[in-house]
Amino acid sequence: MSAATTSAESADEELQWLADGRRIEAIEAISVSAMARRLPALVVRAFRLGWGIDRASVALLLACQAVSAVLGAAGLLATTGTISALFGPGPVGDKLAHAAPSILLIATAAGARSLLGITIRTITVHLSPRISRAAEAAVLRATVAAELTAYDHAGYNDELEAADRGAEVCVDIVGEAQNLLASLASLVGAAGVLTVLHPALLPLLVSAALPQGIASVHAARVQFLANRAAVGDRRIMANLRWYIHLKRNADQVRSDTMGGFLLDKYEQVGRRLDATSRRAAMQSARVSVIGAAASGLGTALVWAAMLWLVGTGRMSLPRGGAAVFALGAVGTSLRGIVGYGADLFRTGMYLDDWSSFLDTAGGHRPKRGTETPPPPGRISVEDLSYAYPASERKALDGVNLHVDRGEILALVGENGSGKTTLSKLLAGLYVPDGGSVRWDARDTRDLDPHALWRQVAVVPQDYARWPLTCRENITLGQPTRDGDEAVMRAAEASGAADVVAKLRRGLSTLLAVEWMGGEELSGGQWQRLAIARAFHREAGLLVLDEPTAALDPRAEHRIFRNLRAVARERAVVLVTHRLTNVAVADRIVVLEDGRVLQEGTFAELVADEGGRFRELWDLQNERTGVPAQRTPAAEENAEENAEGSAAEIEEAGP
């Protein structure tokens, strides 16, 4: 096996790793007694979810279940009366006359129960998708409410996927709960009739159904744990599918000949999922066979007992006939309780993942203040330190700086120096580990994060390409008082007005080529729109992180020419590697390994010949170390040198 293959498998094993302790907790939690204890709470929970969506539907559903149960019991009692009348003494006509009321009741109850069943199914089909959508929306709200750093914590994505799975299975919970209630109601009615016929039959039937119940619970446990263990692998497969067919990566999949490699990875993870599923299926099958065999023996014992009771005269023949119907009803009800109960219990375990995520948003809900900040006059950083959760090294350490309204502050430095991290802390997207970020006199920890973010406009390196109209891509669903006039002002300042003018429907054009009537933009055109949306936003802080990386020189010149006017009422933070662009800045901060190395104006830093900024400036502008282009004479000399070297090698021999 090659080292590359070993490395790839090792990486996959790391991605497959599941969260600590949750599997053990699940194993310990799942048992017959746990199922019996939890089912009532799960039924209540299911109908409470539905109650929050549509109270009238849930009330009607419960009423239909209650009436159906009463009609079922009445039908069984009427069956007993019918059999007694038909097997009693007297002429056939008299027997039929005595049985007629019972037969009429049986027919009426059966017809009414059929209509109620249709009503119940209709309500369930109508209600279930709405519950699932509400559960999914709750996950989305919790995700949006979580701190940005949540994504940097190991296990967060597993928790989020488990919560998504819980939201998906919510579509089944009302149906499973009402099926369980229906089985329970039928059992109560049939058990009452059976107890009247002979008290010994019911406990025998319950003991016959118990092994199958244990087997069903065990199968539910196996399936849940298998699905829970496969969370990481399912996410890997989803990401691989995304990367393989996403248009943004399509050219690289082809030019880098990555298709075969990615498909092999997809198949490898798929085989691992198949193995997990196969093991779970075999474990479930083994215990199900044992449970079915034990229940079969128990059922045989019940029928033997009934035949013995009838044969010995301890139960009359009419009562024995009625007991046959009651035994069938009780057996069906018990199997329903076991089956639907196991399904509901498994669904409840997924629902636990969902509710756990909602309760804590993965443990990453913002824990900040409630103050609403005005546009900042000064943003200051004091002894700031920050480390990403998965890293032991500090991304920022002991940083001190400030930026005032109307000022442009440039952050420069080599890759990994902490520029982008610092810009996110200034914008309140991250909270410091040590020190503080203050908007005027207010620590960002004390500010309402959503109110703070309304005062922030950010152009990140990887900007979003929303599948919305051009107008919505600029306004981001937050139009200003001046409407399209403000949109076009921002577009003019960013150079996006030229892009809008070429679109088929102008600002109303859908920017998603995969949808009917949509159009696609180039990378540079999208970057102009990303800058336009930041210019359009009425914010006190503007953060530009490599804002012109995809722009041509003319478009780039326009951006920086207009930046001073945009900065008049804002504090502007510019993050860039292109040092020619920072000449527009009032002050420049040079970062290295998370610390401030230099600070000053462009002229001051360029004049400091021993400073890091001057070193980077010279590297970007000096080309003395770069080989010159090839000329015909140089090419001829290179060929002669190559021929001479070949001749020398040949003469030297082995």
Image (spheres, grey):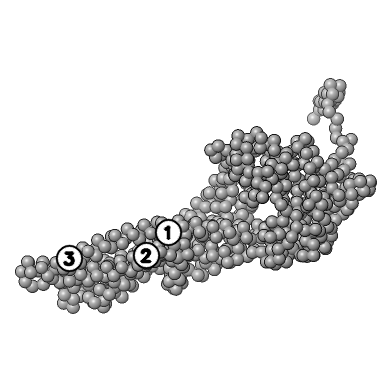
**490 relative to 602 in the view: left or right:** left
Q: Residue type at mark 1: give it.
A: Leu
Nearest to the observer: residue 308 or residue 55: 55
Q: Residue type at mark 2: give it.
A: Leu
Q: Which of marks 2 and 3 is in front?
A: 2
Quarter of the view holding residue 549: top right
- Residue 565 appearing in the image: yes
Residue 24 horizontal/vertical position (percent): 55, 67
Identity of the residue drawn at 16% across and 77% down:
313
Quarter of the view holding residue 594: bottom right
**60 relative to 262 in the view: left or right:** left
> On residue 127, which mark appears?
1
Q: Are marks 3 and 1 in contact (CB under 8 Å)?
A: no
Q: In the displayed structure, would residue 583 be above or below residue 649? A: below
How packed is label 1: few (under 14 Cα within 10 Å), some, or many (20 or more)? many
- The mark that comes first in sequence, 2 or 3, is 2
How packed is label 3: few (under 14 Cα within 10 Å), some, or many (20 or more)? some
Q: Nearer the viewer, mark 2 or mark 1?
A: 2
Q: Residue type at mark 3: give it.
A: Ile
Task: For the C terminus, give its image quadrant.
Answer: top right
Nearest to the observer: residue 18 or residue 379: 379
**423 relative to 286 in the view: left or right:** right
- The mark that comes first in sequence, 2 or 1, is 2
Identity of the residue drawn at 26% across and 66% down:
328
Outermost residue, left direction? 91
| Distance from Cα at disc 2 to Cα at disc 3 | 28 Å
- For disc 3, the marked residue is 103
> On residue 60, which mark appears?
2
